[in-house]
Amino acid sequence: MRQAEAESGDYPLARRVFWTLYHRVNPSVERHVIWLPEARIAYIRVPKAANTSIRTALAQAFGMTSHKGNTPGKDAFWGEQGRKRARRMRTSSFALHPGARGGWSFSFVRHPVARLYSCWENKVVENPDLLPAMADMGIEPDMDFDAFVKAVARTPDAKSEIHLRSQASILTWRGRVVPDFVGRVEEVKADWAHVQRELQCRCGVDPGPMLRRNVRGRTRPDISEHLKPATLDLIAERYSEDFRLFYPAALGRD
């Protein structure tokens, strides 16, 4: 049952209260995993790491559509599919989910400097309205990148807006990386080909090539060459686990 249905008045009061409370303690923004029970495939999203492109590819591959005009990049799209076709859950819940045993899961990450720069460019420079959760972090509209990094660096993951949380905080549970395969946006052609092969072998579905959406040409890892050393130091410290787990050779300087 979706939250909108639970609050619509079409269900008994007790059930509406239950689902309203459920969505408050288990908010949509925290449910990073899209689990496809029939295919036994899970994708664990990382915002600003080809997330929209991957969700679009999966929706097309498994013939999922929206009757309400939602796009696959929106959480509401997956809520429309019903729990038998697609279930969204926290990474911790997925790690403990008995139905996920024997399945296969994947995610994609992005170089921390490029990901952070992309977020600043999109959410602070381009968008006229700052996200409330970013404002709570002390981020201001049109602030420069160096000041933006300082605000991000002093805010722990638990209090950070979802686009600014470390990728490690999303993809790990009790010290281990949860997805079976973690691709890199910088090597998307080869790594997505691996995802294609796995899906073809496991459930006979070919997601086809990834159609890149919401891509910004300037958000390359080599953007580091144009940043102040002090800013790079802050990024390296704030996202130290991302570098250690997913970009150990980068050392925050490529």
Image: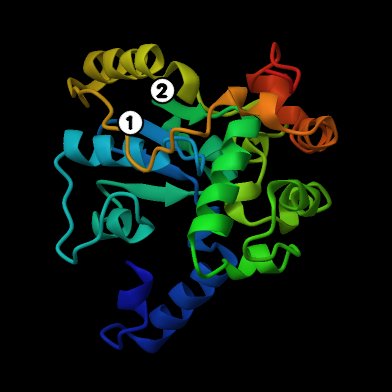
Near-viewer residue (145 or 21): 145
The quadrant where residue 161 appears: bottom right
Label placed on residue 81:
none
Question: Which coloring applies here?
Answer: rainbow
Residue 163 in percent (x, y) is at 58, 49
Q: Which of the image's four quarters has the C terminus? A: top right
Q: Tell which residue pokes out farthest to the front in this image.
A: 226
Q: Amino acid at mark 2?
A: Gly
The spot of residue 61 in percent (x, y) is 18, 33
Residue 40: which numbered mark, if any? 1
Q: Residue visible at 83% across and 31% down?
A: 233
Q: Could you say where residue 205 lies in the image, as x and y percent from the top left? A: 18, 24
CB atoms of marks 1 and 2 within 8 Å: yes
Badge 2 marks a residue whose secondary structure is: loop
Residue under the point 37% across and 56% down: 75
- Please give the name of the residue rendered at 25% of the width and 60% of the height, measured from the top-left corner: 70
**Residue nearest the viewer, comparing 241 with 64:** 241
Dividing the picture into quadrants, the one containing residue 234 is: top right
Question: In x, y percent, where is residue 174?
Answer: 71, 34
Other-residue count near label 1 (Cα within 10 Å), few / some / many at <14 / 14–19 / ≥20: some
In this orientation, which residue lies closer to the viewer: 72 or 31? 72
Q: Which mark is residue 102?
A: 2
Q: CA distance from mark 1 to mark 2?
A: 8 Å
Specify which label sits upstream in the sequence, 1 or 2. 1
Vertically, is 135 above or below 159?
A: below
Does residue 184 appear in this view? no
Element under disc 1: loop
Residue 4 appears in view: yes
Looking at the image, is 46 positioned above or below residue 197?
Answer: below
